């Protein structure tokens, strides 16, 4: 770190060069990277890092142990990467650190057992870039996450960090930046997908002495963790992106609004801001130029609607986070009624690579109408849950089956929920849909912020719709009636259907209410709230119908319709919990009688039936399903009392 | 330069100082307000830091903040009641937040919530009689890859199974018992 603030661009370029040199020297020697993203910390990666440090110290070695941000495969944590070999190890708890240090770093043999395996061959992949998880990915937003120490500004500088800002300050006018952004084709990654350059242009054209730039890090979509990972793994990229935006629109103060659920992200960003200030990259002036800019963090307080731009502005002002009617748009009248630019975390993270490497390069990735890459947070019933970044336009199926490694426990894919409470479900017949703004919209979903929840046949689509509606109903701020009352009526209807009290006409009622809420709500929350319901009705109407007409929930989720999920999965609807309990008590004859009430062929079925009940067993979440068919076979083999069917005589 | 950071100071929910009385806290609250004098829109940060100090926001404190900051009391309570992180009733020493975000929901978060609620014998939003635990729901802690998750105070616990919630709660109970013995 230089002794004092950097006070000119020349000085900056010199210092960045020296960082780069020292890093490339370091890169040739061995390093251990331990992922300390939020996910891996929950899996115990801090202890793993400590164990590596102890092992290094004990061996008197000078190998560096580095704590990085998220590397991607969160469900396999703690994740460790050995450099420069680029070998990724998964599930490295603290007791495994010693072995890896000894075998790989000292003796030079890869510990095959724990190395990341290729999906197809099952062999350890030599370099992680070749694995089926990483090969289809293209890292622009996540370029540094998992590679550098997020708390070390010199590593960011060595990875071309702040070069884009310096370039802008040195040789670009605000108009130049805007036209670069236009060529790049970057669209907002926070959900709505508004062209970023246009927003920048409007804000820069607004006449005012004071303007603000804001970063939306509220990440309210339940089931999404992209922004969090960028903040935790590469906080300087946000600072750089915001500084470039501020220069372009003419602002000198910025705010990052982070939700309170992300203490680690807040702490790391705070640290990064302090480092940038100390180095003269933030403050008055920036790098000795005529531009000055500073940043402050504001913490959310648990309100989903605060992710909406005007509500977020109210919240920063210290008010209730209720949205304001638009127009006026924030670009004219935003924070403290001053022109304000608001972008999402991922949007800002893309700015530096666009400016530094040229907009053309960025625009060469993606499709004709949607450029660049998109980060997705894969979660739900999928093997490789975690953080991935793919070119826009990648087919959904590739993402789920190649990168994601397919559905968990070999179950059948049912739907992917994209875009959270504002989005929709994509069913399996549309697995080939390219993930771009237009194609997803045509299917009644949205690109959204990047949360993707994969669901298998144990998810009931009516219940999923009800879940999202309950969420928006709870989070509706109550300011406008369509959203407050309309979502409530919709929720009541869905509750009724899930409890087995659905009526003919309920589906049509939901569609009608949904259309009304969409058309008349004040802000984006209400305008998109019916989407999860409408999209599930569109793609899974028969499931709604069977809830209403047959009082049947195929997935065995809706409590009012199902006594037990196994029973509802059984084609003959046999009282499985009943007969299993009777067998447990040794009351075989009664058990058999109970079975035969629904299905007289107990002995045959005990041998040949394909036991759909076992697939839906609730125990699967814990260990394995109850062996229902095996119990049945035991039961019929105990048939000591021959059960003569009652013969009815006609008189 | 790899510095470690303390996430405790960064967040606004629970603190060790729950037993501080309101009178004792007033000077500290004044200090918070003074330190944020120059901040525009300081009400929410003041409330967050005050809640950090006391564990909750009693009416007396809100009145004090309203006077000192010259913001109408109605506006202060309007803000407090809007955001779910603020609490006007005392909360337990440990805040247990069960995630019901989408990923956790489809992986059985609801069953975990039911199990914890049964185990603590309290409903969501309330506190045990011994003031040890409060139970709340969360909407995604960003650890979706490890669903279902439960956050106790600042720590995220991953892949919680309904039959294992007892162990989880007991470790906190044991720690507290130890602490008390020391004191
Ligand atoms: C109810 C609601 C919640 C939102 N939540 C978020 C959020 O958590 N993060 C985010 O970046 N954008 C969110 N948005 C979108 C923002 O209003 C805004 O469009 C976006 O932050 C603009 O940035 P972008 O152009 O870079 O995408 C939300 C919108 C609505 C209506
Ligand atoms: S859904 Fe539970 S952590 Fe994201």
Image (cartoon, coloured by chain):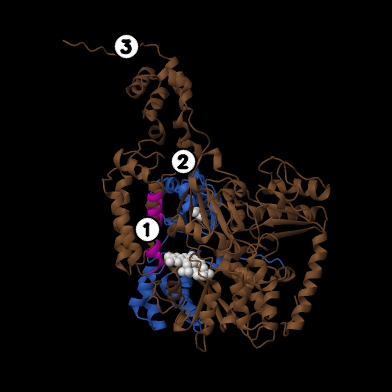
Chain colours: A brown, B blue
Q: Earlier in the sequence, mark 1 or mark 2?
A: 2
Our reading of the magenta stretch's main secondary structure is: helix
Q: Residue at x 42, y 61 (%)?
A: B91
| Front tag of 3 and 2 | 2
Characterize the local packing of mark 1: few (<14), some (14-19) or many (20 or more) Cα atoms within 10 angstroms: many
Please name the residue that numbered disc 2 is placed on.
A457
Q: CA distance from mark 1 to mark 2?
A: 23 Å
Which one is in front, B118 or A320? A320
Magenta stretch encompasses residue A536: yes
- Tell me which chain the residue with mark 2 is part of: A
Q: Earlier in the sequence, mark 3 or mark 2?
A: 2
| Front tag of 1 and 3 | 1
Residues in magenta, as a range: A523-538
Please name the residue that numbered disc 3 is placed on.
A644
**Most distant residue in the left direction:** A651
Q: CA distance from mark 3 to mark 2?
A: 39 Å
Is residue A149 visible from the viewing direction of this image?
yes
- Tell me which chain the residue with mark 1 is part of: A
Q: Earlier in the sequence, mark 1 or mark 3?
A: 1
Please name the residue that numbered disc 1 is placed on.
A530
- In the picture, which quadrant includes the C terminus of chain A? top left
| Number of numbered discs on residues | 3
Characterize the local packing of mark 3: few (<14), some (14-19) or many (20 or more) Cα atoms within 10 angstroms: few
Q: Residue at x 76, y 83 (%)?
A: A10
Compared across the picture, whether B45 is left or right of A287 comes to left
- Tell me which chain the residue with mark 3 is part of: A
């Amino acid at each position: 770190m230089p002794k004092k603030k950097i006070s000119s661009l020349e000085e900056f370029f010199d210092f960045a060069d020296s960082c780069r040199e020292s890093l490339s020297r370091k890169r040739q020697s061995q390093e251990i990277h331990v992922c300390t993203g939020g996910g891996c910390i929950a899996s115990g990666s801090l202890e793993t890092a400590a164990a590596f440090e102890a092992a290094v110290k004990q061996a008197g070695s000078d190998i560096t142990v580095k704590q990085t941000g998220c590397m991607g495969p969160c469900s396999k944590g703690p994740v460790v990467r050995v450099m420069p070999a680029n070998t990724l190890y998964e599930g490295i708890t603290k007791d495994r650190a010693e072995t890896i240090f000894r075998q790989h770093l000292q003796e030079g043999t890869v510990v095959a057992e724990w190395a990341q395996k290729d999906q197809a061959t099952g062999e350890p992949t030599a370099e992680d870039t070749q694995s089926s998880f990483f090969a289809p990915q293209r890292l622009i937003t996540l370029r540094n996450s998992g590679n550098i120490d997020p708390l070390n500004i010199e590593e960011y500088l060595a990875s071309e960090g702040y070069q884009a800002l310096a370039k802008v300050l040195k040789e670009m006018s605000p108009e130049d930046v805007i036209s670069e952004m236009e060529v790049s084709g970057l669209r907002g990654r926070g959900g709505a997908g508004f062209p970023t350059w246009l927003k920048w242009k409007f804000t820069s054209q607004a006449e005012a002495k004071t303007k603000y730039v804001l970063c939306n890090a509220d990440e309210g979509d339940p089931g999404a963790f992209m922004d969090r990972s960028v903040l935790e793994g590469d906080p300087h990229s946000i600072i750089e992106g915001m500084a470039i935006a501020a220069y372009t629109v003419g602002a000198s103060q910025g705010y990052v609004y982070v939700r309170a659920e992300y203490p680690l992200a807040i702490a790391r960003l705070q640290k990064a801001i302090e480092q940038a200030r100390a180095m003269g990259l933030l403050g008055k002036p920036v790098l000795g130029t005529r531009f000055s800019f500073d940043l402050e963090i504001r913490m959310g307080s648990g309100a989903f609607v605060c992710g909406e731009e005007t509500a977020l502005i109210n919240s920063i002002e210290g008010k209730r986070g209720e949205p304001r009617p638009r127009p006026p748009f924030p670009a004219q009248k935003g924070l403290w009624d001053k022109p304000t630019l608001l972008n999402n975390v991922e949007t800002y993270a893309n700015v530096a690579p666009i400016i530094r490497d040229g907009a053309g390069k960025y625009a060469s990735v993606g499709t004709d109408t949607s450029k660049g890459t998109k980060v997705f947070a894969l979660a739900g019933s999928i093997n490789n849950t975690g953080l991935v970044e793919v070119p826009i336009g990648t087919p959904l199926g590739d993402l789920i089956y190649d990168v994601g490694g397919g559905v968990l426990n070999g179950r059948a894919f049912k739907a992917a929920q994209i875009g959270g409470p504002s989005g929709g479900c994509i069913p399996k017949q549309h697995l080939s849909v390219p993930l771009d703004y237009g194609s997803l919209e045509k299917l009644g979903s949205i690109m959204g912020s990047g949360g993707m929840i994969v669901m298998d046949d144990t998810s009931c689509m009516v219940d999923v719709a009800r879940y999202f509606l309950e969420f928006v109903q709870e989070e509706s701020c109550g300011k406008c009636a369509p959203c407050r009352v309309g979502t409530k009526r919709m929720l009541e209807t869905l509750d009724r259907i899930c409890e087995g009290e659905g009526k003919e006409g309920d589906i049509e009622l939901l569609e009608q209410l949904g259309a009304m809420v969409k058309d008349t709500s004040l802000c984006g929350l209400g305008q998109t709230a019916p989407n999860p319901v409408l999209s599930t009705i569109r793609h899974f109407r028969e499931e709604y119908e069977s809830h209403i007409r047959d009082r049947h929930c195929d997935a065995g989720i809706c409590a009012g319709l199902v006594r037990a999920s196994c029973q509802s999965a059984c084609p003959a609807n046999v009282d499985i919990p009943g007969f299993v309990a009777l067998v447990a008590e040794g009351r075989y004859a009664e058990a058999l009688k109970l079975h035969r009430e629904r299905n007289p062929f107990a002995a045959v079925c005990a041998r040949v039936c394909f036991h759909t009940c076992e697939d839906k067993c609730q125990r699967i979440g814990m260990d394995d399903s109850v062996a229902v068919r095996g119990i049945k076979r035991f039961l019929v083999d105990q048939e000591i009392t021959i059960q003569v069917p009652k013969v009815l005589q006609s008189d | 330069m790899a510095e470690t950071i303390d996430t405790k100071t960064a967040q606004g929910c629970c603190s060790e100082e729950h037993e501080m009385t309101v009178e004792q806290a007033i000077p500290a609250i004044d200090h918070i307000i003074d330190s944020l004098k120059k901040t525009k829109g300081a009400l929410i940060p003041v409330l967050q830091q005050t809640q950090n100090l006391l564990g909750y926001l009693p009416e007396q404190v809100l009145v004090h903040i309203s006077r000192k900051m010259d913001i109408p009391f109605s506006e202060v309570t309007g803000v407090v009641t809007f955001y779910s992180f603020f609490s006007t009733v005392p909360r337990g020493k440990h805040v247990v937040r069960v995630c019901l975000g989408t990923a956790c929901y489809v992986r059985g978060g609801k069953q975990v919530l039911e199990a914890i609620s049964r185990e603590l014998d309290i409903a969501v939003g309330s506190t045990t009689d011994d003031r040890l635990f409060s139970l709340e729901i969360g909407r995604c802690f960003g650890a979706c890859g490890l669903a279902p998750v439960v956050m106790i105070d600042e720590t995220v616990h991953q892949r919680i199974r309904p039959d294992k919630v007892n162990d989880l709660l007991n470790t906190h109970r044991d720690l507290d018992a130890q602490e008390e013995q020391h004191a």
